[in-house]
Image (cartoon, rainbow, N blue to C red):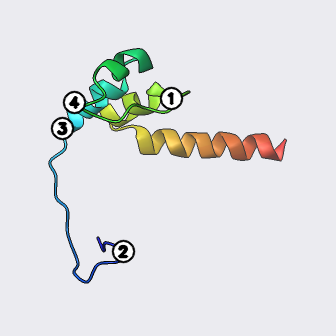
């Protein structure tokens, strides 16, 4: 990553607890606020089913199905 305004390139490295992140994202917003020091809260209206799809490694399949559904709706 290049930092704007600097002369040197920099790489930032961090370990992320993916399982902890997914569990955090599945919580309701109010519960996330209580633990906001761990992860950033999800935006209003966040679709928790996306997290479930990621957990079960079905996100790509879900996206493809959504695209196909949208294409069919546009044809009609």
The residue depicted at 38 percent of the width and 28 percent of the height is 52
Is 68 on the left-hand or right-hand side of 2? right
Residue topped by disc 4: 20
Residue topped by disc 2: 4
Q: CA distance from mark 1 to mark 2?
A: 34 Å
Could you tell me if the residues under marks 4 and 3 are in contact, i.e. CB atoms within 8 Å?
yes
Quarter of the view holding residue 35: top left
Mark 4 neighbour class, 10 Å CA radius: few under 14, some 14 to 19, many 20 or more: few
Mark nearest the camera among 2 and 4 is 2
Q: Secondary structure at mark 1?
A: loop
The residue depicted at 30 percent of the width and 26 percent of the height is 24
Compare residues 39 and 58 and report the one nearer the observer: 39
Mark 3 neighbour class, 10 Å CA radius: few under 14, some 14 to 19, many 20 or more: few
- Residue 5: % across, % down: 35, 77
Is 30 on the left-hand or right-hand side of 15? right
The mark that comes first in sequence, 3 or 1, is 3
Q: Does the image show residue 58?
A: yes
The mark that comes first in sequence, 1 or 2, is 2
Residue topped by disc 3: 17
Residue topped by disc 1: 47
Could you tell me if the residues under marks 3 and 1 are in contact, i.e. CB atoms within 8 Å?
no
Mark nearest the camera among 1 and 2 is 2
The mark that comes first in sequence, 2 or 3, is 2
């Amino acid at each position: 990553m290049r930092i704007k305004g600097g002369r040197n390139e920099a790489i930032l490295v961090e370990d992320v607890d993916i399982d902890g992140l997914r569990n955090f994202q599945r919580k309701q917003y109010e519960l996330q606020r209580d633990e906001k020091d761990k992860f950033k809260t999800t935006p209003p209206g966040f679709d928790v089913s996306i997290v479930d799809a990621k957990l079960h490694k079905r996100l790509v399949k879900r996206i493809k199905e959504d695209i196909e559904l949208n294409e069919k709706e546009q044809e009609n």
